[in-house]
Image: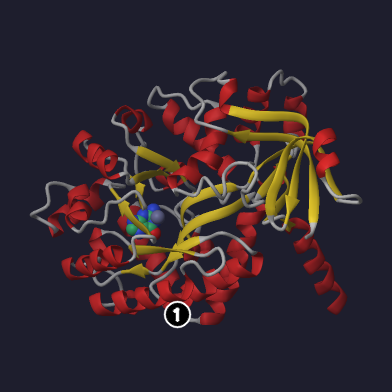
Amino acid sequence: MSELLIRGRVLTFIDEPKGIDDTASYLTVDDGAVLVRGGKIAAVGDYAEISKTAGAGVAVADHRPHLILPGLIDTHLHFPQTQAIASYGAQLLEWLNTYIFVEEQKFAEPEHAAFIAGRFMDELLANGTTTAVAYCSVHPQSVDAYFTAAEQRGMLMVGGKVMMDRNAPDALRDTPQKGYDETKRLIGKWHGRGRAQYAISPRFAITSTPEQMEMAQALVAEHRDCYVQTHLSENKDEIAFATSLYPDAKDYTDIYARYDLLTDKTLLGHCIYLSDREISVLAETGAVGVFCPTSNLFLGSGLFDRDRFDRLGARWSVATDVGAGTSFSMLETMDEAYKVLHLQGQRLSPLNSFYRMTLGNARALGLQDRIGSLHVGADADIVVLDSSGKSAMELRMRTAKSLTDELFILQTMGDDRCVSEVYVAGKAMKKRKATGAARALETA
Ligand code: GUN
Ligand code: ZN
């Protein structure tokens, strides 16, 4: 079985950091190494010790002085919106109608879906993200394109076709029965195939009739091992519209609760304007509120109240939400998360940021045994970060005194230029891309 020894400064979380200096929450090894065998992590620790347990002549990827972390995880974004990032001027509902529902129609075309899916996966990897949870378009062929591109790269990706049967253009609407049948067939085809995981995806209450919600309810009951993803309480006009469509519901959250869509496998994008009652429902059901800072600022939606989630015991994760989100980079996302919380008098420590992008998001997905930390038996999804990836960072790093200083610099100033390498199931993906480009040049 092939072995690879990845050498550098190892950093991995064991638990959520309780404060700025909670050294018990993580493991760090200055001259560390991760031994990869057959795509999984076989050992983690001191380079000197680990190299003894490796087979003779093992290949060594020496990344010193860079940081070796688990691959980053993004818990909410939209693959068909890759070319719609930076669409000017509108808030949520106008933005959807003006830009997004036009863009997503292109995904009826399998060639277009395949092209964007490939570029989407490469963009994630270039930013150090090895697992993401994405919405595809309403077209089943977009789901095929998405999981095919993930499979070609060996990535653990979660996704699903959006279900929409109203308040969207004809070309983007399914029906309750069609949405059910297509989702069911896609689950049969993709869920659990290799590393693929399916997410049942009614887009949001505005674009699904009660009949479609009932079909989503049936799908969730029949496929307890699939994820569920939808949007909740992102924008005030959206909330007024959604609740007007479901007059019997107590509030927006109750719409989803009535159809049994809230479980510990449910990811709810945004969750900005929830009442204490609604957050308590998330806490009771285990559903996760997904904080999407660059999107919430870009669309002028509002500020996610992390402290209230923590106080009421509800789970939350972090995500880019491309293409309302403005960057594929989880580092840039945490930079904005810091600012959104700061505006509300809340603090996000650099340790907590890095926990959130890795083990925290893995826990939100219930995948902590497989991804999100560097432990023996985990999948070898790994990112190598260069804290001096930009010249201004190199200069700033000269004054850094601690690991937390360094992490804060990375999150505040960093982007894809800081991703020195990324491994998917032990395979170096930057090298793979370079080889692909070289081959393209040769054949040109
Ligand atoms: N609510 C429903 N659909 C979407 C979407 O595509 N992006 C965002 N940000 N919110 C939504
Ligand atoms: Zn979204």
- The amino acid at mark 1 is Ala
**In x, y percent, where is residue 273?**
27, 40
What colouring style does the render use?
Answer: secondary structure
Q: Is residue 390 left or right of residue 231?
A: right
Query: Residue sitting at 17 percent across and 70 percent down?
Result: 211
In which quadrant will I find the N terminus?
bottom right
Ligand 2 picture quarter: bottom left
Residue 27 in the image, given as x and y percentages of width and height: 64, 29
Which of the 4 quarters of the picture holds residue 94? bottom left
379 lies left or right of 91: right
Q: Position of residue 171 (x, y in %)?
A: 34, 79
Q: Which residue is mark 1?
A: 108
Label 1 neighbour load within 10 Å: few <14, some 14-19, many 20+: some
Q: Residue at x 53, y 40 (%)?
A: 359
- Tell me: 353 left or right of 229: right
Specify the farthest residue to the left: 248
- What residue sits 56% from the left and 50% below the top? 370
Which residue is more in the foreground, 283 or 49?
49
The answer to whether residue 232 is seen in the rendering is yes
The extreme right residue here reads 57
Residue at 63% x, 52% y: name it.
379
